[in-house]
Structure formats: structure tokens, C-alpha cells
Image (cartoon, coloured by chain):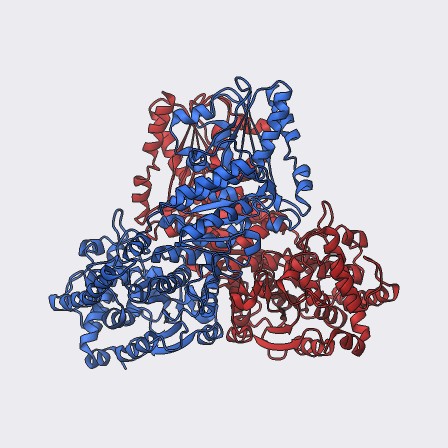
Chain colours: A red, B blue
Amino acid sequence: MDIADRIKADPAHWRLANAIRALSMDAVQAANSGHPGAPMGMADVATVLFRNHLKFDASSPHWFDRDRFVLSAGHASMLIYSALYLTGYEQMTIDQIRNFRQWGAITAGHPEYGHAEGVETTTGPLGQGIATAVGMAIAEEAMRAQFGADLCSHKTWVIAGDGCLMEGISQEAIALAGMQKLGNLIVLWDNNDITIDGRVSLSDKTDQLKRFEASGWRVLSCDGHDPADIDRALTDAASGKDGRPVMVACKTIIGYGAPNKSDSSGVHGSPLGAEEIEAARKALGWTAPAFVIPEDILADWRAIGARGKDARAAWNARVDGAANRDEFARRISGEVSDKLAPTIAALKAQALESKPKVATRRASEMVLEVINPELPETLGGSADLTGSNNTRTKDLGIFSPENRKGRYIHYGIREHGMAAAMNGIWLHGGFRPYGGTFMCFVDYARGAMRLSALMGLPVTYVMTHDSIGLGEDGPTHQPVEHLAICRATPNTLMLRPCDLIETAEAWEIALSNETTPSVMALSRQNLPLLREDAGENRTAKGAYILREASKEPAVILMSSGSEVEIAVAARDLLEAQGIPTRVVSVPSMELFRDQDAAYRKEVLPKGPVRIAIEAAIRQPWDWLLLGERGKEKKAGFIGMTGFGASAPAPALYKEFGITPEATVAEARRLLG
Amino acid sequence: MDIADRIKADPAHWRLANAIRALSMDAVQAANSGHPGAPMGMADVATVLFRNHLKFDASSPHWFDRDRFVLSAGHASMLIYSALYLTGYEQMTIDQIRNFRQWGAITAGHPEYGHAEGVETTTGPLGQGIATAVGMAIAEEAMRAQFGADLCSHKTWVIAGDGCLMEGISQEAIALAGMQKLGNLIVLWDNNDITIDGRVSLSDKTDQLKRFEASGWRVLSCDGHDPADIDRALTDAASGKDGRPVMVACKTIIGYGAPNKSDSSGVHGSPLGAEEIEAARKALGWTAPAFVIPEDILADWRAIGARGKDARAAWNARVDGAANRDEFARRISGEVSDKLAPTIAALKAQALESKPKVATRRASEMVLEVINPELPETLGGSADLTGSNNTRTKDLGIFSPENRKGRYIHYGIREHGMAAAMNGIWLHGGFRPYGGTFMCFVDYARGAMRLSALMGLPVTYVMTHDSIGLGEDGPTHQPVEHLAICRATPNTLMLRPCDLIETAEAWEIALSNETTPSVMALSRQNLPLLREDAGENRTAKGAYILREASKEPAVILMSSGSEVEIAVAARDLLEAQGIPTRVVSVPSMELFRDQDAAYRKEVLPKGPVRIAIEAAIRQPWDWLLLGERGKEKKAGFIGMTGFGASAPAPALYKEFGITPEATVAEARRLLG
């Protein structure tokens, strides 16, 4: 059927859908950059979704029980901006649409969480949206189990493109969702057969329906330009029939409505140009000027935006009447539990008594053992390294289709999918997720970890086996540059505690945080309790004097995590040789950077030789070693200059020269 | 059938297979760490493979036309070490087996390329092996097309576990291999239903056969402990029947032979213990002492190791008789073409004449336009950003099942899979791969990029849109920390050229390299030609004086890539104000670090104010700003402190204060 006949058959649909097309064409053209093809191709599916299925109230973007809508194909951002404007989200004015992709506008090139209300998560890096949506759907199931369907019962809708489905992370997401039977998760695949390079067949011939089915999904198809057929498929998808997540293959034409450029990669990522826009307007029967939506059409869209008002009011009434409404309110607010501080304080006091020599990964487990029973909002997990990451405490049941009250997720060997799901869990609300893997596999999770930082989500990465101390597994499993990677990433808190007390403090910081992800770097090997006080959270200063010199220090040894023990041993040797030596523990460079100049100077005064000790590369230490203004000082580094090796950890520390003796030798050399 | 009956039915097989089991148990026990479960579970499959199918000659590990064997489940390293020892690889002595996982041994915890001959690639980070094998199979097809089946015709065999198949990268690899119809690629899936956390069903219920089929694979199954059934499946798989790659699901029992611990996660990653080893020996009928292989069994294994001698001799004869044998020898040696230097020199000379103002991504294309026709060993590609990465030159046909002579690969939206495939292409031999994506998507490719560095493979990453200069696509697409990430990674050459001449020099360095991957960071936006000379490859120094100060410099401006233009403009402003200012271009910190102290001091003398200008975070610049010994200097940084934003590039440079004017102001402030 050609487009004119389609319009004739259902004008009520097409005037709505074409409003999305018109705004998308106009905004991309005005910005002279952007992606008109996908919004025009998916305008019909989005219209049917918003008009008939999505549970939302444009006047209340943060309504907890709304359906979540995730535009995984983030380059199609004008699709969501159009929908937000048309349905009447207050922030999304026509001026914002006009300023698409301009400095200061909330209409960024790709949807950015925190800019425009209604954007549920940042997308653009492909595959992130679908994997984040899996986390949202997990959180929805878990909240429903804890608070009942009266307070929590909604769907997560995803629009994904071919790029999302080609990225490996999509497989991790699909397999996890299928195994977990996330029946409220619905993926709408924009099956347009086009990528930037050309036809999809240039690089992929996967039968996507079969692939999703293989991972436990129900699959449906529809003509993505036939509103009745779309509605049929979405109705079926939303029925939650057999508990499986649903994928709907929507056969679309990219750039639909642009008569000369549609169905080609040319319409994917470039403005249509004035001439083609003119031709498209003609084909669509769209006569309004650029950026103008005729009043009657806008009114119809605004009515769609108000569709959810009654449902929201009913939900509000149910919440008001709920016995556990205060706890529910606390949970969905993300507020920090007032049980956190005393629980941590008690553990620290106890640690000071018992002085346990444990790996910090075990220390982390000891913290979780006291925290998890007190904080029902924690939702833990690991990418198949539960026993190594020490992430599961006894009180947490296993989250599964049979036990939605379980608070521990076996994410499988899927670091990237886990990280994205953690983002989604936080974004959904109700939980504070943490998840474990080896520090080295930051590499696998990077795409989603960066989005935690960019969006400002306080999720916690429990990264164990954080150095050559991992030992025999060898260089593929030994992080060397990963501390630097995390420290280089904006808005990321790297915490590398040296003992149980610092580990407890690190968790207190992580679980109190509201806008920054934390990366805990934890040791495989046992470490002594080095702290001699358990009052103040000194980790919160980022760096502090752990051992003072016997008199005016000649040497300052700085270190983090498992190497602080080496610094303390080296200090004792140096002091025995009459060299006054201070040890500064540096559990977090970011937090130290945030301290005022006076404190920093107090900890790291001018004058003494400075040596940093860390079983990793030097790069992030230079500013501490050399001073921000480079004042005269002598500086040394005891650490790694290349990859590690396979051998028992003690052999590695010796062979790579990360020892008290090597530190003493370096100090003496620098003292001259 | 229980194990005793199985042994009775085919003793000739079991004595061979149990030799692998015995060595694996003994070595893990001696090391007191490692993974006995997978080698014991896959011993039968491996035995049938080595005995009847794998084309190899243990006396000639580098024979080009050997079948490649990739142990994607790298933790099963004792499987390959056992096979190498048993078949008679010279390096793999019984002492090496005894020293499994010890300092200095070639028997690292996970197989490390370059340690033991016969290890075709480093594995351990899951999924890397299967994705690397795809690159090997691509290279095999391409070499066969260029030199004929007489010189190149072999298979790539992979053993993959559940972990490999859960990792997202596996989907990228599977889909690419299926689309490319890599009929010589055979994956043997160790279908043992166990992961570290327990049963696979805890985290995955994917129907793997259906999933592989969906991506264009032929799928087979076998009983992984029935040698006849294994042989049937492998024979069928190796037939190359219909051109599709083949996946064989081998139903196995993890730790097979250990009567009390098999079929459980307990046998995955821990030594069996003396008692269970004793019980296993009994069950297997294995009576020889630890690390001892009875002579007759060893003799049979050694005969297997010599099976390929005749085939190799015949191949040698064919090579000797081949018309193009010299070029073939050059290609498989990886030797640098002698056409490279003059081609680059000519381009540089021409650039100095025409002074083109082009983006460095376009400059890179101009280099490839002259290089690709001269160097038939280049094999280019992009992860679906061909037009943006400027990676395809006209002379390169598209590599596809229909055109194996094509030298351009549409990798699809699969950065991780592309990077791993590039590793495999180099490891196979015959080609120098390069591949493109946006710099920001280093995040997606990290797992494989780290292995390029760890293995020392001179592949080239063409990373365009390398800063906020990307503009409107916004912070998800703007690298900020990625230059730091690459610079923090050992054995990685980060090249960020500032104009066409530096870009040509960077390519010359990358294509001459033999042991280090190169990451080219290239601009989206146009840049003027700044170099005023085209003789020496000055980029090879890492940093050099691009513009000298009018007299003794008061200020030194250091910069890389697209910001060098800003440094030069700032210098002109400062000089106009009577402040003598030097500009140092820093295309590669790694190469500058390699220069002698005298040269470094000449470029960066003590005294002047130093300012670094780079649209990225400061971390990697500190050592240059502050000096390695922290001698007195005043240092400033003009760059980024957080994520970028969505807006046109000029607006971003202005808003983030990366301008000549801001540089001048900072210089004046530091001069006091």
C-alpha cells in the first residue's frame, strides 16, 4: 500500500504520526545534524504505543508506577523529544525542539538522562538501552514482590534498532531477560534493514526472531506502518501471556515519508535537505510550517498525554492507603537508610577489637553481612564469580522467576550486561544495586560503567582481585591500568581500601552516595588490620596520615589497598634506620582532590621525599607525587610498568620489586 | 555407560585421553591452583581432535598451513599444555608441566601467546578465543583467495565453554562468522552445564544450537565421552559440507573421571585434592606416578604429533614450486613492505606543497589511498562507520563469501568482535589489519584491545571523532578519558597526529611496528597543515618543537592532535605580547618517553612555564607538566575536567575554555 492510501485508510493515526515525522525532519534540518531516518521510520509504532498502550501521565514524569519507555536506538532522539513535546511534558517546549543539539538545550544529540524529564536513561552507545531496560524490568518484578501489584505493576518498553541487536551486550541482556522470564519487558525492534554502511545484509544475516526465541522470548511481528497491525501486536505483547519477555519485529522503512531518500542509509544520519523535506511534506499531506503543529492535532496528542491521569490518581490513593507507605516512599526516593551509619560504626568498633587479617574482598562480605539484613534496598549480584567476589550473604535469597523476593542475582558471565542492568535497577527506583566481577573485567563492563558515571547513578561495582595479588591466573586477569582507567573517568569514585575498617568506610560512602558510582577495588589476598582508630570515617577524606613519622618526616610513603601494608613495613625499616617516615593511606584520589588546600598540604607538606606504592601503573599518581604546581620535591614510584605474570602472588611482588626493601632502597636513593 | 565400560569398549582411546586427565590433575594439584574440571571434561574431544582431525606437526609449530587450535575456554589451559607435551612440542617439557603457574614457566595460568609454541592466541578473558578465531578464519579465506588452496587451506578449531557463549562478544563473533560463511571454522562447545556459580540454568537457559543456527551456523551434537560419536561429529564438521561454520555441542561431564567431584562447580577452579586424585586414578585405571606418562602411551601420542609431517613436506614442496613464493614468504613473515617508506615520503612532500586543511580522519584516508594499492597485506574495515572513519579506499573490494579477494570488511556494529578479529587476522599471518570506530567506543572494544597489547600484535585501531570536536552527538560519543585509557595501557602506542604530515608519519610508524598495537586518534573536524617540513619522521620522536620561540622561551605550550592548532594560535598571540613561546607537538607520549634524557631536556628544558592543551582529561599530562623529578616549574592545563555536551564543536571549545585566548590568559597568570 502506498503512503497516500495508508493515510486515507486511517487519517486519525497518520496526523498524529506525521507530527512526529514533521518535527523530526525540521529539528534535524535546523541543527544541520542528526538522524531523521529512525524517528520517521518508527513514528507509527511510537504513535500506537503512546496512544493506546504506554501507561504514563505527561504532567507527572516521575510517577513511580508509569511504564518505562527506553529508546535504545538513541540516535532516534527526535522520536522521544517529539513525543514528549506532543504529549505535553512541561519542560519540552517547542523552543527546546528548535534548539535540538545546541548548547544548553535539553534536546541533546542523544537522549541524556537528567536533561529532559521523560528520558528514562541515557542512550546512544548502542545496546545500552535494551540492557538497561532489563535492569528496570528486574527492579519492577522485585518491587512488586516486596510491595504488591497495587503499588508496583508496570511494563518496560524498548525501541531497539539493528545496531542494538548486533552489539554483544544485547545477547547478554536477551539471555538474562529470557532466563529471568521478565514478562513485563517488551522490545520493539525497528526492523528497517539499514545500517550506516548500507543494507544490514552487508554485515548480518541473523534470524532475530529465532535468536530471541532461543533465549526464551516470545516473538511477534507486525507491519510497522499499519496502525491496526501494530496495535494487534502490541496488545498481544502487553497481555503478558505466558510470562516470557516479548520481542516484536516491526517491519519498517527507514525515513518513511521521505519519497526519494527513504529505505537507504543516506537518511540515517544526515538532514534530509530542504528539497526532500518539501517532497516529504507533500507525500505526508503535511502543510503546517516548520515546527508548527496544527492545534487540533496538538490537542489530540495532549489528550494522549493525559490518558494516564486517572490511573495515577488511583495509584496515589492506593499508596495513601497502604500500610507500608512510609517505607515505600523511602525506597522509591532513594533516600539513604538511617541504619547505615550505626551499622558501619558497630562493625568498625568490632574490627578494632578483633583485628581480623582478611582479604578486603572478604572484608566487603563482612560489611554486606551486617548491611544487607538492615537495608532491604540492596540488590546484589555477580557475573558468575559469587564465591570469589564474596558478594552473596546468607540472608539474600536468589532472585529468580520462582522467587522474586530474592535479592541476589546470578548475572551469568555477563559483566557488561550486569553493569547495564545495575544502571536500570537504580533508574527504576526502589533498590541500590551492587555487582561483582574481577577488577580486570572493567574492560568488559566499560560501556555501561561510563554511563553510570555520565548519568550520575550511585551503583556499586565490587571489583575483586584488584592487582597482581591475584597471582597464578596471570596477566589476562591482573589489572594494571584499570585503577588509572577508573580514576580517569569523570564522576567515578575509585575506592581502594587497605583493611576491614577502610572497607567498611568505603561501603558507607558508596551507600550514602546519590550521584556517583563507586568502584571498590578489593584484594584477593589477606591483609592485616592497619587502622588504629574506628571513629571518624577517614576514608571520606580520600587520603590521610595512617602512621606518623617519629619526627619531622624526611619521607612520605603514599599507598592504597593491598600495598599500604608494604608502606607500613617500609616505614618501620626506615624509622629503624633513623629516617623519619610518614605513611599516607590513599583509599580515594577523588575524595582527596575534593579536600581543601590546607588539609591537602597538612597531609602532603612540601619538602619530604615522596614515594607512591601501588601494584599498578604510575599515571594517576603523578599529581600527588609531583604536586599540582610542581614545587621542588623528589619523587619515586614503586609499582608496575607493564603487564603482570602468572605465579603465586608473593613471587610476583618480589619479582616486580614491590616490597618494603625496594621502597627503602628507593627512599635512600632519593634522599641522596 | 559408566566409565569402566567406556574404557573397556575402546582402550586405545582412553589411555590417550586419560594421559591428559592425569597431567591436568597432577599439574593443578602441584600448583595448588588452576582448573582441572574442563581439561578432564574435554579430554576425549581433544584426543579425537588431535588424533584424527587436527592438521599439525609438533616439530614445526609455525608451519603456516597448520590447522589453528584455539582454546577459548582458556582456564582449561592444562588441556593444551598436556596436548603439546604429549604430541612432542619441543618447548613443552615435563618440567614445564610440573611448573604450571610458576614464575618463569611457559605454562601460565591461562594460555599466553608467545610463551609456549602451539598456543595460537592468549585466552582466559572469556569469549576472546572464539572471536579471535573468527579473524583467523577470515585470514585463511583471504590468503587462500590470494595465493590458492595449494598454499593455504586449513581449518580453525575452537573449544569454547558456557562462559564464552554467555559473553556478548560471542554473539558478535557468531553473527559475523555466520554472515561471512566461514566454513573452515569449527566450534566445539564444552556443554557441561556448569559454571563457577553452579548449574548453567542459574543464569542461562539459551538453546545454543538454535541460537547458532539463527546466525547461519550448521549445528551438530555428540556425546563428548564417546570417541566414536565424537569422531563422527568432527568428521561431519570438517567436511565443509555447505559452507557454513559449524558448531558441535559436545555433551560432557565436567571433571569426568573424578568420581566424587565431577559434574559440579567444585571441580571447576580448584585442585581435586590428593584423595580425589587417588579415586580418579582408580576410576580411570591410571597407575603411573604423578607426571609420568607410560612409554607406550607417550609413543602413541608422539606418533600423533608426527602425523602431519608428510602433509607439511608436501606443502613445502608446493611453496618451493610456486611462482609467487617470494611474495608469499614475505607476507607470512609479516615483514614490512619496502614500498611503505617511499610512499609515505611522497605523500608528505605533496602535502607540504598543497597544504590541505582536512580532518585527520580524512588525512588518514589520504594515506590509505596511497598505501593500500602498494601494500596488498592491508585488510581494512570498520564497525559500521565506514564513511565516518574514512577507512575504505576505492581499490579495496568488499570481503564477502562471494568475494574473498575483497580487502574491506564490514564488521557490523561490533567493536569488540572487530578488535578480536583483527587480533586473529594478525595471528594467522598474511595480513596487517586495521579497523575503525569512534574513539569513544574504545570502551566497547577494550577486552580485545588489551589482548592486542598483551600479545604484542601490531594491529591498527583507527579511532576517529576523538574529542568534543565530534560536536552534536554529545557526551555519550565524546571521548574524554579514552586518551588516558590508551596511554595507561602497557605496550600500546597512542598516536594523535595534528595534521596530514603527522598522520602520514603515524601510519608509517603503525605499519612498521612489529610488536605493538597502534591507536590512531583522529579528528572529525578540519585542521590546517601545521608542519613546515616533510623530511624526517618527527612523529617518531613522540614530541618535538613544532614552533620555536622568538628567543629563550618563557612559555612552552604542549599539545596533541586537534589542539595543536590552538597552541600555535596562542603562541602567536603571546609572541605578539612579547612573550617568547615555544610549541611542542606531542603526537605520542609513549614514543617521547622512549627518547634519551638529553633529547627530552632539549624539547622541554627547565624554567619556562608549561601548559598542556588537550580536549581531554589532564591525568596523562602530569609527568610532562611537572617533570619526572618535579623540578620547579609552573604548570597549567587547558582541557576537560568532566564529560562533554551536545552542541556544535566550536561552541563546545568555547564553552569548555579550550581556546587560544584561554591559553594566553593561563600563561599570563602563571608568569605572574
Residue B112, percent across and down? 32, 53
Q: Closest to the observer: A413 or A255?
A: A255
- As drawn, is A342 to the left or to the right of B492? right
Q: Residue B278, image x and y in percent?
A: 21, 66
Q: Position of residue B419 (x, y in %)?
A: 45, 55
Point out the residue furthest to the left here. Answer: B295
Residue B39, image quadrant: bottom left
Rendered position, B391 above or below A170: above
Q: Residue lying at the far right in this picture: please name it.
A: A295
Q: How many marks?
A: 0
Q: Nearer the viewer, residue A603 or B664?
A: B664
Picture residue at 58% right of the left edge, 75% below the top: A244
Closer to the camera in the image, A413 or A566: A413
The answer to whether residue A111 shows anywhere in this view is yes
Of residues A71 and A654, the one drawn nearer to the viewer in this rendering: A71
Q: Position of residue B558 (x, y in %)?
A: 53, 30
Which residue is at a point 59% across and 73% down the rendered structure image? A245
Does residue A479 sit above or below B48 in this rendering?
above
What quarter of the picture does the N terminus of chain A occupy? bottom right
User: Eyeballing the image, is B531 above or below B670?
Assistant: below
> Can I make out residue A440 in this image?
no
Q: Is residue B482 above or below residue A74?
A: above
Could you tell me which quadrant the C terminus of chain A lies in? top left
Looking at the image, residue A498 sits to the left or right of residue B291; the answer is right
The answer to which image quadrant residue B89 occupies is bottom left
